Image (cartoon, grey):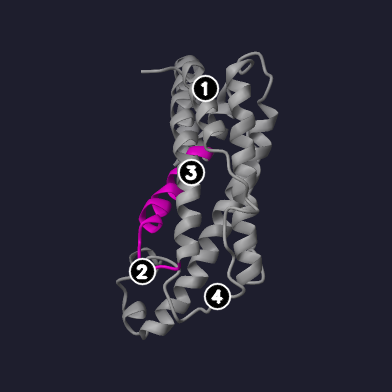
Amino acid sequence: MATALELAPRLTDASRRKVWDVHSAFDWPERLTPGETWFMSPELISIYGTEAFDGLDESARMTLSFYEVVNFFSFVLYGERPLISGLMNRMYRKNTEGPITEYLHHFVDEENKHMVMFGMFCNRYAGKIYPEKKIVLTREYAKGEEDISFFCKVMIVEELGDFYNLKMMSDKRIEPLVAKINKVHHVDEARHLGFGRELLREMAADFVPAWTKEERERFQGWLV
């Protein structure tokens, strides 16, 4: 298994080969019409399989799929905003110097493009990005816990997002622009996920064994 330090140069090369411009990568229609096509795979809609969904006609289901994809894009956008900030704060540290920081620059660049991409869709066609809803609680951290917590949050947001991306990027039923946005996001996130899984595994191996039983239980409770 390759370490994060070994993965970083390979991922940097891949990011350079697959570099793209967020402003020219998509053909943005003048307008999209909810109710005339699917914008999210119907099986992914939050109320799919319920009496509420079954009671809607197809046009209403398609309209709902538009607002659900706007909600999904807003969710991922808000998840990537603190990710960018957190990654930048971890550049050029003693344990991330060299190839890892070099790859983090590409990581941040790609996440910024994703925010622009999702923001453009939501603002153009829904007129807004859905507001963020969260609770921030103050915490005390064991050694290494703050970084491990950060990358756990990163992985949760990206794993959830990629599940939806994979389902929608090849779904011929949905609006082609939405399918392409999901595909572009998945291609970049595949690299981010591979790097993040390994880095998180290494960090946990370095720090978690030294935590007390109480610190491990506190962290596990927070993570759940």
User: What is the x, y in percent for residue 92?
Assistant: 69, 20
Q: Amino acid at mark 1?
A: Ala
Identify the magenta region: 154-175
Q: Is residue 140 visible?
A: no
Of the two numbered discs 1 and 3 on the same chain, state the one appearing first in sequence.
1
Query: Of helix, strand and loop, which one carries label 2?
Result: loop
Find disc 4 in the rendering and name its residue: 32
Find disc 2 in the rendering and name its residue: 173
Find disc 1 in the rendering and name its residue: 8
The residue carrying pointer 4 sits among few (fewer than 14), some (14 to 19) or many (20 or more) residues within 10 Å by Cα, namely: some
In the rendered view of the protein, which quadrant contains the C terminus? Answer: top left
Q: Amino acid at mark 4?
A: Leu
| Side of 160 where 148 appears, left or right | right
Q: Nearer the viewer, residue 20 or 4?
A: 20
Query: Of helix, strand and loop, which one carries label 4?
Result: loop
Q: Nearer the viewer, residue 205 or 41?
A: 41
User: What is the x, y in percent for residue 211?
Assistant: 50, 19
**Magenta stretch secondary structure, dominant:** helix
Q: Is residue 159 visible?
A: yes
Q: Nearer the viewer, mark 2 or mark 3?
A: 2
| Side of 162 where 49 appears, left or right | left
- In space, the residues marked 2 and 1 are separated at their CA atoms by 37 Å
Q: Nearer the viewer, residue 171 or 128?
A: 171
The residue carrying pointer 1 sits among few (fewer than 14), some (14 to 19) or many (20 or more) residues within 10 Å by Cα, namely: many
Residue 150, quarter of picture: top right
Find disc 3 in the rendering and name its residue: 158
Residue 194, quarter of picture: top left
Q: Amino acid at mark 2?
A: Arg
Q: Residue at x 66, y 71 (%)?
A: 127
User: What is the x, y in percent for residue 54?
Assistant: 31, 80
